[in-house]
Image (tube, helix red, strand yellow):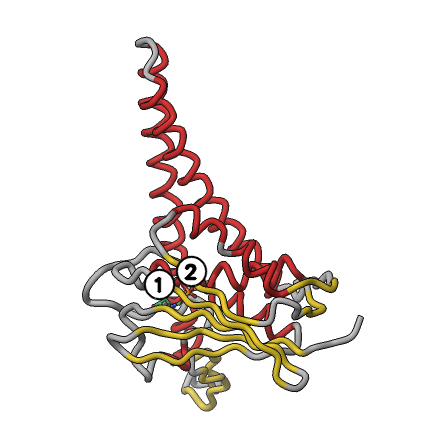
Amino acid sequence: IRVQGKIYYDKAQKPVRILGTVLDITEFKRLQQQKDDFISVASHELKTPMTSIKASIQILDKLIRTGNNPEKISTFIDKASTSLNKMQHLVESLLNVSRISAGQLELTKSRFNVAEMINESCDYVRLAGDHEVKINGDKGLEVVADKQKIEQVLVNLINNAVKYAPCSKQIIIEFAQRKSTVKISVQDFGEGILSDKIPHLFERYYRVESSGVQYSGLGLGLYISAEIVERHGGKIGATSETGQGSTFWFTLPVVED
Ligand code: ADP
């Protein structure tokens, strides 16, 4: 509690009146703490790929000076480029959060084919070759939406399915139209999420605390995804069973262009 005020005295310097305010700052302190924690997590998340890029450049410098070793050179170029992509993704998330706060998340809608968009969004997982991605749905289905942003939502969900289910090799993506809504879901067979955590997943900065493996992340992907889906007039949610896996889904209204 913060107390601010002024004491009034009489001629004999005896206090006669206090005028002031008593402010409950518990919530303010919680938000301040959340911000401080976020800054420290974000700095750490940016520092890790930066350190890796720096190390790769130093090694590349040596390799190039000491003659040709093309295989090693391309390994370290790949490493640096993966770390750069990670940094780019993090910075884009931060920019998106400030756009959302400023009410500047603009949508540029067009008509596109859902199956094609899903295929494009999971190309990189297929290329990595660690996961099998199954896609089920009506190949002719089309929606009117901001394709780039919906792709961003899907990539966030697919990234999480890969990240939080490291031991399982399968991801199932399904999409279907029911009445005037298209529903897209991404299912993994990972560790799952406790049911009391599910309502918080889409909050800004929220991350499920884990006593086991520590995963990297800022707790922004699902928050940004929810904002994008809701701006389209859709809904987003998750169902999960611990030890069995999770299904994240979102809907988009079918609108005519
Ligand atoms: P980040 O992955 O950067 O922490 P997200 O907003 O994408 O942030 O996810 C918030 C939290 O939700 C994660 O920290 C994780 O605990 C949980 N989560 C998200 N997707 C999954 C998933 N597929 N399986 C298990 N937990 C998940």
Farthest-out residue, bottom: 16
State the residue at coordinates (44%, 61%). Answer: 158
Q: Residues within 10 Å of mark 1 (few under 14, many from 20)?
A: some
Estimate the x, y position of residue 129 in percent, counting from the top left.
Answer: 37, 48
Compared across the picture, whether 241 is left or right of 218 comes to left
Compared across the picture, whether 110 is left or right of 61 comes to right
Estimate the x, y position of residue 104 in percent, counting from the top left.
Answer: 68, 62
Dot 1 and dot 2 residues touching (CB under 8 Å): yes
The quarter of the image that holds ligand 1 is bottom left
Q: What residue does disc 2 label?
A: 133
State the residue at coordinates (73%, 61%). Answer: 108
Q: What residue does disc 1 label?
A: 170
- Check residue 58 in the rendering and tell me which mark sits there, or answer none: none
Q: Callout 1: helix, strand or loop?
A: strand
- Vertically, is 124 above or below 76? below
Amino acid type at mark 1: Gln
Earlier-in-chain disc, 1 versus 2 = 2
Camera-nearest residue between 116 and 211: 116
